[in-house]
Amino acid sequence: MRQDNQLLVITHLSQLLTFITGFGGLIVPLVIWASQKENVYNMDEQGKNIVNFQLSLLVYSIICIPLVFVIVGIFGLLALCLVSFIFPIMNAIRASHGESPKYPLSLNFIS
């Protein structure tokens, strides 16, 4: 098993594809994690954190959509947008220094 902080950084930053293409923020990290979890040190742990975070964002977005009619959902979606932009960048920086990522409000789908 090899240490590859650059691939970990790329995996975290690939979540931002959602802002560029509208999708891919879950698919690309999932593919990288699934294909490299046996080869790269810490990829399994960090990949699970990324996938759990992306699935959590999806669940929270689905919850916020009907709440848009009560105005609360708009603020929820804006908060999710900010969190989904800021935390992948922060955790990419952490990964480049060999630290573990910390994603807030992440539900544990994959353990």
Image (cartoon, rainbow, N blue to C red):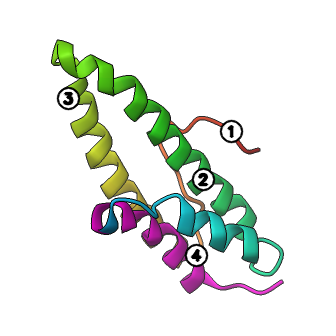
Residue tagged 4:
8
Mark 1, Cα crowd under 10 Å, few <14 / some 14-19 / many 20+, is few
Is residue 97 visible from the viewing direction of this image?
no
Contact (CB < 8 A) between labels 4 and 3? no
Q: Identify the mark nearer the N-term, 3 or 1.
A: 3
- The secondary structure type at the circle numbered 1 is loop
Q: Identify the mark nearer the N-term, 2 or 1.
A: 2
Residue tagged 2:
51
Eye-nearest disc, 4 or 1: 1
Q: Identify the mark nearer the N-term, 4 or 3.
A: 4
Contact (CB < 8 A) between labels 3 and 2? no
- The secondary structure type at the circle numbered 3 is helix
Q: Which residues are magenta?
A: 1-20
Residue tagged 1:
109
Residue type at mark 3? Phe
Contact (CB < 8 A) between labels 2 and 1? yes
Residue type at mark 2? Val
Q: Is residue 4 magenta?
A: yes
Residue type at mark 4? Leu
User: What is the CA distance from the residue labelled 4 to the residue labelled 3?
Assistant: 31 Å
Which quadrant: the C terminus?
top right
What label sits on residue 75 in the rendered view? 3
